[in-house]
């Protein structure tokens, strides 16, 4: 069986983090989102991975190469991104037998993907409290009878989780017309498959569409919880490591520092002295967390530096960022409401009472900068010493 992994999207809702990296290649707990997807497919027994690429395709090719975990890898290019069915259709010549379709920016529980493969043809599903926001699966006699998109009165709470195993015959069903949104929708292909085959619903224990910056933070929280304690780097005898913490070879934790798990310190990173890394934090490659810095429940991507006496909480910080000494992030609204963030020009609730900032690549802050909860700093943004930033820049 082949697994077609859709990885051509830029991810405009993830900006500014996706401005230099395609969304499926944004890291979660030390590896790209798409790698978590690929590993779930490999563990389920797939024989070949076929990546549909477009924006930033060289980054996908560079990471996965021609073989990933001893599984052959192929690539097809989606020249014009006209929807999910169009993405799968781009790989039509590679399809030989039943095939899986997975989204490179989704996270799935691996055991669920294995069950999906076992009962093919099949559609992954998940139970949610707000099914009206999704495609709802209607099931009759153990088979999916219909997928209703965003119904006003859903019949149940079982929704489409964006993972499928389709019969080989679906290869000839991929040429669907443009929808009202101007895209070729994979759901139209699924309607054809459902009408001709008994398609089994497989309920996943957990699933996540990683589409917006705070969801990247939530994804990191999820996957960090799967690591066992592993200390391969250089940890001072005067440092304290508590719980399930990974310190990769080449990383350094200096004296007086405290790291609470779950946390991940990547190779080349330097912590401290006297720094405090609190649970559910990912510190990327070659990141420098300086003296008396506190980082809580955050993602710091490669080559970033956080100057001494700074605080970062519930935030996602891009690559090559330099936080001047004394930079402090606010992560809680005093009115108690959920923090909002700008997505595609509109303020959107994160659903989180605590959320800090989203910082793009190559940002630099002056010393003693204060960043308000929900602020986004686009790549190359600057602040001056002592500045308080309350709006996106």
Image (spheres, helix red, strand yellow):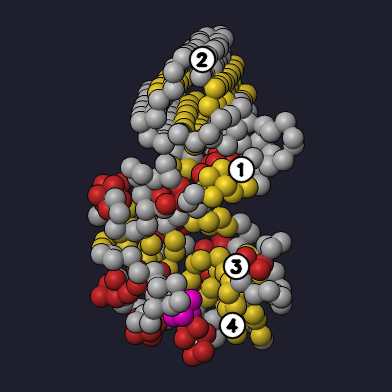
Mark 1, residue position:
340
Disc 1 or 4, which lies upstream in sequence? 4
Q: Helix, strand, or loop for circle 1? A: strand
In the image: residue 140, left or right of residue 107: right
Q: Nearer the viewer, residue 171 or 119?
A: 171
Tell me if residue 53 comes above or below residue 242 in the rendering: below
Whole-percent x, y for residue 143 in the image = 61, 83
**Which residue in the structure is indicated by mark 2?**
386
Magenta-tinted stretch = 186-190
For label 3, the SS is loop
Residue that label 4 marks: 146
Q: Is residue 32 visible?
A: no
Instruction: Tell us which disc is closer to us: 4 or 2.
Output: 2
- Quarter of the image for residue 99 reads bottom left
Image quarter where the N terminus lies is bottom left
Q: Nearer the viewer, mark 3 or mark 2?
A: 2
**Residue 158 drawn at (x, y percent):** 66, 70
Instruction: Classify mark 4: helix, strand or loop.
Output: strand
Mark 3 to mark 2: distance in Å?
45 Å
């Amino acid at each position: 069986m082949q697994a077609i992994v859709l990885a051509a999207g830029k991810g405009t809702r993830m900006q500014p983090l996706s401005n230099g990296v395609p969304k499926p290649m944004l890291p979660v707990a030390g590896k790209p989102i798409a790698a978590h997807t690929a590993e779930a497919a490999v563990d389920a027994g797939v024989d070949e991975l076929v990546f549909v690429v477009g924006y930033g395709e060289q980054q996908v090719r560079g990471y996965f190469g021609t073989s990933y975990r001893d599984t052959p890898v192929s690539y097809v290019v989606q020249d014009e991104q006209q929807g999910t069915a169009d993405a799968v259709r781009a790989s039509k010549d590679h399809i030989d037998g039943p095939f899986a379709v997975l989204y490179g920016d989704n996270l799935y529980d691996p055991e669920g993907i294995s069950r999906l493969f076992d009962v093919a043809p099949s559609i992954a599903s998940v139970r949610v409290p707000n099914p009206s926001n999704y495609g709802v699966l209607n099931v009759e006699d153990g088979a999916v009878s219909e997928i209703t998109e965003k119904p006003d009165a859903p019949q149940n709470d079982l929704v489409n989780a964006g993972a499928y195993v389709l019969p080989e015959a679906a290869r000839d069903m991929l040429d669907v017309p443009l929808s009202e949104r101007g895209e070729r929708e994979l759901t139209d292909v699924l309607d054809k498959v459902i009408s001709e085959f008994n398609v089994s619903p497989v309920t996943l224990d957990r699933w996540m569409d990683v589409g917006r910056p705070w969801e990247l933070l939530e994804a990191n929280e999820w996957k960090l919880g799967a690591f066992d304690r592993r200390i391969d780097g250089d940890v001072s005898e005067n440092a304290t490591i508590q719980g399930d913490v990974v310190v990769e070879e080449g990383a350094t934790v200096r004296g007086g520092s405290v790291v609470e798990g779950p946390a991940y310190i990547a190779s080349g990173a330097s912590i401290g002295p006297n720094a405090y890394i609190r649970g559910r934090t990912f510190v990327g490659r070659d990141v420098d967390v300086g003296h008396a810095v506190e980082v809580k429940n955050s993602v710091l991507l490669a080559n970033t530096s956080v100057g001494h006496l700074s605080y970062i909480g519930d935030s996602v910080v891009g690559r090559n960022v330099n936080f001047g000494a004394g930079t402090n992030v606010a992560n809680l609204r005093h009115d108690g409401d959920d923090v909002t963030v700008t997505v595609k020009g509109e303020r959107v609730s994160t659903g989180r009472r605590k959320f800090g900032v989203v910082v793009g690549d190559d940002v630099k802050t002056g010393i003693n900068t204060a960043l308000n909860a929900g602020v986004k700093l686009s790549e190359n943004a600057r602040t001056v010493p002592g500045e308080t930033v309350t709006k996106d820049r």
